[in-house]
Image (cartoon, grey):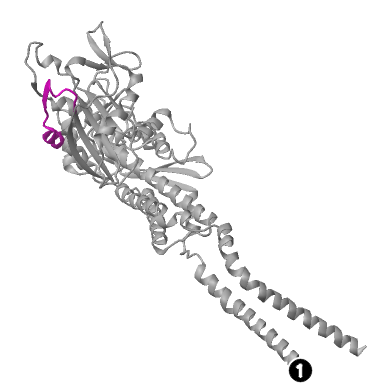
Amino acid sequence: MATIEIEKRRGRNAALAIAAMVIVVGIPLWWRTTETYRAWLPFSQIDELDSLQLQLSVEVEVVFSRGTLIPELQKKVPLTETREQKHQVDAKTELHYSYETKYRTATIMEEDALNQPTAQEADLSLHMLSESACGSVVVYIIPETSTLLPEGIKVYVGQRRTALLRTGVFQGRGTLKEVLSAVHPLVKQVVDTMSFSHQDILAALSDRLRVGQASKQSLADSMRAIKSSPGYEITFSLLNPDPKSHRLHWDIEGAVHSYIQPLLDKLIPIANFSVDSQILYYAVLGVNPRFDSSVSAYTLNADSLAHVINPVEARLGSNAASSNPMLNFLLYVPDAQHSPLFIRDHGQKEVTSNAFHSPRWGGIMVYNVNDMYSPMTEFPVDININMTKVMGVFLAQLRLLLGVQKTQPPPDFLLQSPGSAGLSDWELDRLLWSRSVENVATASTTITSLAQLLGQISNIVINDNIAQQVSSAVTSLHAALAELEAGNLALALQYSREAILASERAFFDPSLLHLLYFPDDQKFAIYIPLFLPMCVPIVLSLLKIGSDIRQRRTNKLAKKD
């Protein structure tokens, strides 16, 4: 009996020792070695970004020239006033616009510049005196008797950040407050034209807002423009479907240098650009044009243009070494059997430029050459393409695709053409405002979506690199919001670009793929066959020990009784 009792005690001790080892050492070790590593993320700051509060500040300077203010009022300037507007777009998006307006009189040198014979010369002279900061607007008030502006024109907007406003409402002896109240609506129209409008900001926030909150025109401009990216690939392609008849020559290098490069140089703060070109032989549009006997020409209707891109795109190729978006500009020279070829709009009218563009893809221009040689000419014919005509069309398409929105000023506004630069300074500012707001909205949406994803799926690894990218994106977003509030447009764009790059790197990190990790049901399927055979004897032993202890207690109580 003693030997049996010793064996039972030994078995109980062994079972208890094994159970203790499993509980004290085995389970913590297994838990530690199989747990998912999740670095710390600033979830509280990310939750704050879900409710976006944007404050945009614009510096406006209103300069009264000689003859617009009576001497008594001239003594009361300079002065500064701030006007604010608030828009509650939806429950999670709020917009604040702050216009800090400084009023002063013109200096002697500015008066000399305003005495130039034309508005263009005055704009250049004023620019030579001082260069306005990025995002700011300067409005010069000139008297009604000034001959700088043509008849019927009230406002002239030049190539820089300067506007000339001609009005005679300040000739009376009103108080300064009455004068400023009268000038404010006119200045507001100028600022909306040269800086940004509420509809422009709503269009930039289109990814966060419901459809219908932005105007159709602003939304169309936003959907047409290619999405913000740190770089773009621009490709110019010459399509020659009939090399046996046409030997085409185009000076694409010189044309890009003269017409496209000045625009790209001004857009350096927004993105980096890479430009290349190619010639494709025997490349056709993929749509059979119809012959119109009334004009003795072939035509492409607007409904068939959508079927042109896919067959051509297969021949274009892509740059495998770059992940940047690509913009394609195609110059198509019809073969001799289908010339001339004209594009018609939905109203069956010929398109003046004989070209069309596809949103976020590029543009195609049809270039007819049949009038450059006679029917008796021997083929192939050497043809020099007029690059001035071609680049004028491609430049207009490039502006639209990059987001340079069409402005619709009042009828008494005169907007100076950007000239050889391809982009006015105030047009660049409008683009910078839109891009900055779009980047902030996109980055905040990406970060909040990532935070929600990581919160819902607990077994996704969050490594230190992802945590660093998320923290960098949050920091850059707060910096961008602060710079927008301070009116520092260039810095706001820089921080917003850093935010969107960091947020996308974190969101698309390969280590976040959920398929690399096992869900809970698969874990049970793996661990049960491994641990069940080991745990059953231990559990049964513990149950037997518990049963023996209860039996001994029962026997002791019976003996006492």
Q: Eyeballing the image, is 518 above or below 155?
A: below
Q: Residue at x 58, y 73 (%)?
A: 27
For the residue pair 95 and 228, the one nearer the viewer reads as 228
Q: Looking at the picture, how far across and down is residue 267, in whole percent?
A: 24, 42
Q: Eyeballing the image, is 107 above or below 548?
A: above
Q: Eyeballing the image, is 508 above or below 205?
A: below
Say which quarter of the image contains residue 406: top left
**Quadrant containing the N terminus in the rendered view:** bottom right
- The residue that label 1 is drawn on is 2
Q: Looking at the picture, how far across and down is residue 35, in whole percent?
A: 51, 67
520 left or right, relative to 403: right
Q: Looking at the picture, how far across and down is residue 462, in whole percent?
A: 45, 61
Question: In the image, which residues are magenta?
Answer: 239-258
Q: Residue at x 23, y 29 (%)?
A: 330
**Quadrant containing the C terminus in the rendered view:** bottom right
For the residue pair 374 and 155, the one nearer the viewer reads as 374
Q: Residue at x 56, y 74 (%)?
A: 28
User: For the residue labelled by badge 1, is the local secondary structure a helix, a strand or a loop?
Assistant: helix
Residue 238 visible? The answer is: yes
For the residue pair 337 and 133, the one nearer the viewer reads as 337
Q: Looking at the picture, how far across and down is residue 479, in whole percent?
A: 37, 55
Q: Is residue 340 magenta?
A: no
Residue 167 visible? The answer is: no
Q: How many marks?
A: 1
Q: Residue at x 41, y 34 (%)?
A: 199
Residue furthest to the top: 294
Q: Eyeballing the image, is 109 above or below 515?
A: above
Say which quarter of the image contains residue 387: top left
130 left or right, relative to 488: left
359 left or right, relative to 123: right
Q: Is residue 252 magenta?
A: yes
Question: The residue under label 1 is which amino acid type?
Answer: Ala
